[in-house]
Image: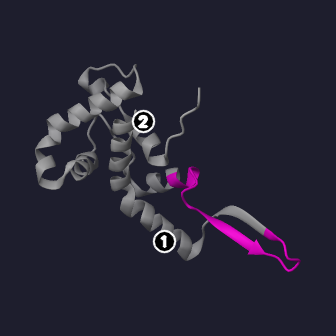
Amino acid sequence: MKEVVYTFYEQIIIDNIDLEPYDISNDGYLYDKIKTTYNIFKKEYGFMIPRVGEVNAFKEWLMGLPSVLTVPFMNSEILSLAKENGLLNVRCITNHLDGTTTDEEVYAEGRMLESIEDRVLNRYWTNLALAFFNLKDNL
């Protein structure tokens, strides 16, 4: 059987589902956890779906740090996880005088790093919401 590889944002969702505050066991299939989390979202925040759409409503709900899905929310923690997972890396292609080329992934620095960090932080909540619905619709 082929191993499933989840995106950075999908893995954050998966790692932070906690059904116990709702007296539901955390044991079980991922599909069931996602479905249960979605049902809790709809019960708690579904009234916003007609106003802002499902993904934006989920994003707003998630930003309120619901107990069922308390994801990392501090910028320093988000950036630390992003660094660990290679999101702050850039592709570096070097042409050498002897005509050879090296192609490697390196940790960004300086203004490039700041730009990448800003992008990660600015899109974090939206990307989490999109990742959740990708999981929900494809499991």
Q: Residue at x 85, y 76 (%)?
A: 99
Residue 74 spot, x, y in % from top left:
39, 53
The kind of residue on which mark 2 rests is Ile
Label 1 sits on residue: 115
First in residue order: circle 2 vs circle 1: 2
The image quadrant of residue 46 is: top left
- How crowded pointer 2 is (Cα within 10 Å; few <14, some 14-19, many 20+) is rated as some
Q: Which mark is residue 17?
A: none
Vertically, is 125 above or below 139? below
Residue 91 spot, x, y in % from top left:
64, 65
Q: Residue at x 10, y 44 (%)?
A: 47
Q: Residue furthest right?
A: 98
Label 2 sits on residue: 14
* Number of numbered discs: 2
Vertically, is 8 above or below 95? above
Point out the stretch of residues depicted in magenta.
Answer: 82-101
Q: Dot 2: what SS?
A: helix
Q: CA distance from mark 2 to mark 1?
A: 27 Å
